[in-house]
Amino acid sequence: MVSRQRASTAALEGVLDGLLSDADQAMVNAFTSGFRVSQTKLAISKSLTDAEAAAAALESAQVVALAILVREQLEPAQFEAVYRPFATVLPGPGYQPPPPVDRQIAAFLRGLPNLAGEVEAEVAAVAKVLSERPKPVPGGAGAVANVAPVASGLDPAANYSAAWKLVIATANQSGRTQSFRAMQDSAEQAAPHDGLGIVGFAGVAAGGIFMRDVLPLEKVLLLYEPFAAALPYESLA
């Protein structure tokens, strides 16, 4: 849900809207109403019992389905960005199995020093959403820059915190604490130290990657989420 609320993703969905005006209307309708939507809702409800989370998942699935419909008219990078929320759990066209952990982390460390400008600002904005519990704002204004507010009944920060606690506990239980901390330190040193506050989040992301073999995949992806657009997880090779 956070992934779809990035400013960069929203811009791509705007491109998608324009392309759909020339698409087969019957196909568009199939993914926005009717029996196919009911099937998708039923499938999602088996995994997500929270009504708001299920509604957000359905909307995200519909966007991806529509992107597939007009895929040939999108640039490959545009399609990959729209498909990103599902790219690892439901591999799309051209998917490659993840490389060894050491290669993934090395690729992540190489990319961190290059983060700058709007790309880095978006990383920081997503990191803030995942680290701060939402605060009521008079009139509903005050969204974090580059990231729209999530549905009121959802708490990405609580999920992020719980995932990180699980990683730490798992590292301790598996006797990997020293190596785990070394990976964190390496990422924190490689991240830009320019006041935007992404240093600690780089360490968290690296720690999640390092422990990926003993964690549910969704936990790894959640911990990596601040960097998912700037340095897509699937590209770490």
Image (cartoon, rainbow, N blue to C red):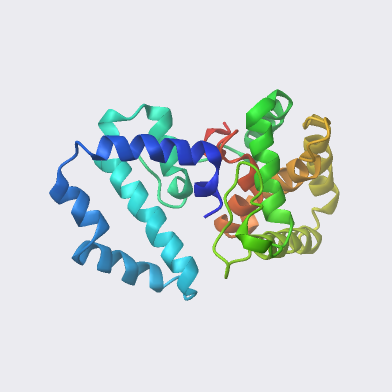
- In which quadrant of the rendered image does the C terminus lie? top right
Residue 88 point in image, percent of width and height? 47, 47
Q: Position of residue 223 (x, y in %)?
A: 66, 51
Q: Position of residue 130 (x, y in %)?
A: 68, 54
The quadrant holding residue 24 is: top left
**Residue 202 at x, y percent in the picture:** 74, 41
Above/below status of 187 relative to 173: above
Q: Kindly tell me whether residue 96 is visible in this rendering.
A: no
Residue ID at (58%, 41%): 228
143 relative position to 34: left or right: right
Residue furthest bottom in the image: 49
Residue at the location (30% across, 49% down)? 65
Residue sitting at 38 percent across and 28 percent down? 76
Horizontal relation, residue 41 to residue 196: left or right: left
Viewer-side residue, 116 vs 207: 116
Is 80 situated above or below 220?
above
The residue positioned 56% from the left and 55% from the top of the image is 217
